[in-house]
Image: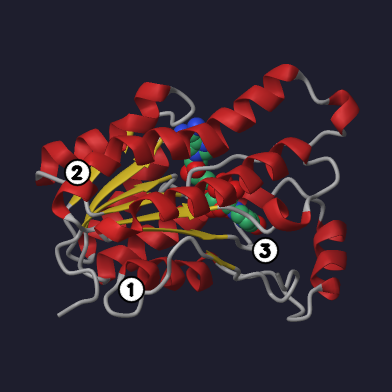
Amino acid sequence: MKPLQDRRAVITGAGSGIGAAIAVAYADAGARLVLCDRDAERLAVIAGHCRARGAPVTPCVADVGSREGAQAGVDACIEAYGGIDILVNNAGMLTQAPCVDLTQAMWDEMLRVDLTSVFVASQRALPHMLEQKWGRIINIASQLGIKGGAQLTHYAAAKAGVIGFTKSLALEVSKDNVLVNAVAPGPIETPLVDGLSQEWKAAKSRELPLGRFGRAEEVAPIVVLLASEPGGNLFVGQTLNPNSGDVMP
Ligand SMILES: NC(=O)c1ccc[n+]([C@@H]2O[C@H](COP(=O)([O-])OP(=O)(O)OC[C@H]3O[C@@H](n4cnc5c(N)ncnc54)[C@H](O)[C@@H]3O)[C@@H](O)[C@H]2O)c1
């Protein structure tokens, strides 16, 4: 028996990086998948990888920055598999600017994509999870939501919001066996950090106790664990920190 055998899982931002690695790990763990991304081409590639590993996959092209887009993955899961067991809110974006230069549009977009989508998708999934008395919601935050980051006030605010949302929702629904947790990675080598200079990345690596950035494949197994039984059973409102030792909360 695989750890997520036949579980019905929605993963947002599955077309790249951490989300793609979670999709592949969930396929190997036996889950039935709805993979969401706004990038149809990349999504199709990852969907193909997961199908090749034997997983049923329903792709869902949607922008989680809109209310309808954030609900679309859950709706697709209900339609394809008759319910939802696991929601992984992973889709996220990164822009950078000093606070004095940050436009209202940049702030609003960041909050919509990285925070509001987590609320909207979770709210859509909850009635189904509460009724069946089994559900797992796993939110991908960031260590910057804990330690902050210069030129990243909007990103850090959104990710801190994700951590607060996770704790509060966990308090509301854990008695019904809906467990809500977050993962707050440190620097992970994905396209999200492509925009940062090699120089900055090298300096940052030297500063990390582990001496290197993480890889998406090193984050994904934590997201499997949180949805597995019995390994994930006792995590309630926690934030797990795969961060090469950068923050020790
Ligand atoms: N890479 C890191 O160092 C790092 C560190 C901490 C947290 N994170 C978080 O991990 C998550 C995944 O990041 P990643 O590094 O894999 O990034 P990535 O850029 O490789 O992948 C993000 C995916 O999300 C999709 N996406 C972005 N905005 C979307 C939207 N509005 N609607 C639908 N899909 C959208 C993109 O198309 C992409 O496929 C994000 O929430 C990010 O904030 C990343």
Residue type for callout 1: Asn
- Which residue occupies 35% across, 23% down? 68
- Which residue occupies 77% across, 79% down? 211
Q: Secondary structure at mark 1?
A: loop
Q: Does 114 appear above or below 207? A: above
Q: Which residue is mark 1?
A: 233
Residue type for callout 2: His
Q: Position of residue 121 (x, y in %)?
A: 37, 37
Residue type for callout 3: Gly
Q: Earlier in the sequence, mark 1 or mark 2?
A: 2
Question: On the picture, is 237 further left or further right than 203?
Answer: left
Mark 3 → mark 2, Cα distance in angstroms: 32 Å
Could you tell me if residue 59 is visible in this image?
no
- Could you tell me if the residues under marks 1 and 2 are in contact, i.e. CB atoms within 8 Å? no
Question: On the picture, is 56 further left or further right than 222?
Answer: left
Q: Earlier in the sequence, mark 3 or mark 1?
A: 3
Mark 1 → mark 2, Cα distance in angstroms: 19 Å
Q: Position of residue 132 (x, y in %)?
A: 14, 52
- Could you tell me if the residues under marks 3 and 1 are in contact, i.e. CB atoms within 8 Å? no
- Give the class, few, some or many, for how many residues have Cα within 10 Å of label 3's Cα (few <14, many ≥20): many
Q: Position of residue 177 (x, y in %)?
A: 27, 61
- Which residue occupies 72% across, 73% down? 248
Q: Which residue is mark 3?
A: 186
- Could you tell me if the residues under marks 3 and 2 are in contact, i.e. CB atoms within 8 Å? no
Q: Which residue is mark 2?
A: 128
Mark 3 vs mark 2, foreground winner is 2
Question: On the picture, is 69 further left or further right than 52?
Answer: right
